[in-house]
Image (cartoon, helix red, strand yellow):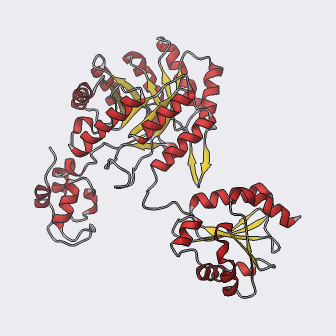
Amino acid sequence: MALSGVEIFKLLPKTNCKKCGFPTCLAFAMALAQGKVELAKCPDVSEESKKLLGAASAPPIRMFPLGTGDKAAKVGGENVLFRHDKKFINPSVFAINIKDTLSNDELTKKVEEVITSEIDRVGQKLRVDAISIEFASGNAQQYESAVKLISEKAPNTIIILNCKDASAADAAVKIVAARKPLLYCATEENAEAMANIAKTHKVPLGVYADGLAALSSLTEKIKGIGVEDLVIDSGAKNAKGILELNTQVRRSALKKSFKPLGYPIINFVLREDPVLEACIASVAVAKYGSIVVLNSIEKWKNLALFTIRQNIYTDPQVPMQVEQKVYKIGEATENSPLLITTNFSLTYFIVAGEVENSKVPTWLAIMDCEGLSVLTAWAAGKFTAGKIAQFIKESGVENQVKNKELIIPGMVAILSGSVEDKLEGWKVTVGPREANAIPTFLKTRSA
């Protein structure tokens, strides 16, 4: 049972040292009781108190890693219902489901789709994270062969062993146990056998039951066997079920401190229609799905789902931004044009991409505007003539360009005169209003 703030306070040093970032130990205790802070923030708490406070300080939703190495992913650990309250922590893991009935060539082709799925979007590497290997053949030897082939072809990819047959699962786990795969799944019928396999090999276990009452009862049973790292599946398959049941699970864990449902959620959204599958998957990402298993991973679908996931799991209170400096795009020389814009990540990558498309070597000055877009930064007084002039002077770019000409975004053409007044010896040119016009603009100037 979770401890109250007052009960936690009794176990703290009571020094009011403020090292934890709170004005008093009581304030820290109240925050700890609400799951808003971790016990590790208090450097002076005794070892005895740490043991007693373990349950109170643990995240309401258990967190643990899937996979190993640089492509491992953490699931769980979330402590808010809404991202405007506090940033969601661990992005949803995308997995493709592959049946063991496919030929070796077909399995290899599917694995290749996963390996080549990585894209760079606004400075982040986004990819399909996992492969779910389904025991569809009913043949343990065939399943073992498929697991071995896929694990060899995708040595760094997270593996989900989608197999309810305990004997087949046991043989398959032995092949990839060192990679910390997710074993899916334990049901009411095979719970004890699957839990023992997961316990023996120290791997996370997926738990399936139809409905939350049966699911919570089953997680308690498995936890009693000694398996702590669980992923839960309520049986929700369509958008309505995912929305309702995932929300109930998250609310139960966060608002009611109901430990039997305090685990990451896995949603199988398998559909033959890729558009429908993408729509249902987007609901799972938006509504607390820690692992989303797909039937196919077309590139257009990946881009849509990667973008949704990236937007959901960024901090809405801290805009994504890049470092303030003058970037060299292509083999820019002293005769190359100089553009300026703000350091909002999306702005930078769109502008830089269009400059690269133009094939015109260019200097791109990125000014720190606290991660705001051009118009927003201008309206907030962060992208003004005075600040632009100061940045250009301090950047040292005037020593890199022969023709002292600064091209400003067309959206803030109104600044051209005042920027020119403040940058003595410089010419200010108004560039395109939209980034997609940059290639034509640059090519025309260099012709």
Position of residue 412 relative to residue 96, above or below, is below
User: Looking at this view, is 237 or 59 the one in front?
Assistant: 237
Along the line of sight, the residue nearer the viewer: 437 or 401: 437
Residue 164, image x and y in percent?
A: 39, 19
Residue 185 appears left or right of 152: left
Horizontal and vertical percent for residue 372?
A: 53, 65
Whether residue 40 is visible? yes
Q: Residue at image x 61%, y 49%?
A: 120
Counting every numbered tag in the picture gives 0
Tell me the quarter of the image containing the C terminus.
Answer: bottom right
- Point out the image quarter for the N terminus: top left
Query: Is residue 140 positioned above or below 107 on the image?
Result: above
**Is residue 45 in view from this perspective?**
no
Q: Choose between 436 and 263: the one closer to the eye.
A: 436
**Residue closest to the eye, 247 or 87:** 247
User: In the current view of this chain or complex, which residue is farthest to the front?
Assistant: 414
Quadrant hosting residue 433: bottom right
From the viewer's perspective, tell me whether residue 120 is left or right of residue 41.
Answer: right
State the residue at coordinates (48%, 43%).
Answer: 72
Q: Quadrant of residue 262?
A: top left
The relative height of residue 150 versus residue 8 in the rendered view (above or below) is above
Single out the residue that lies furthest toward the right: 447
Q: Where in the figure is residue 157, as x and y percent of width and height?
A: 53, 36
- Residue 365 is situated, as x and y percent measured from the top left of the image, at 67, 71
Residue depicted at x 26% and y 66%: 20
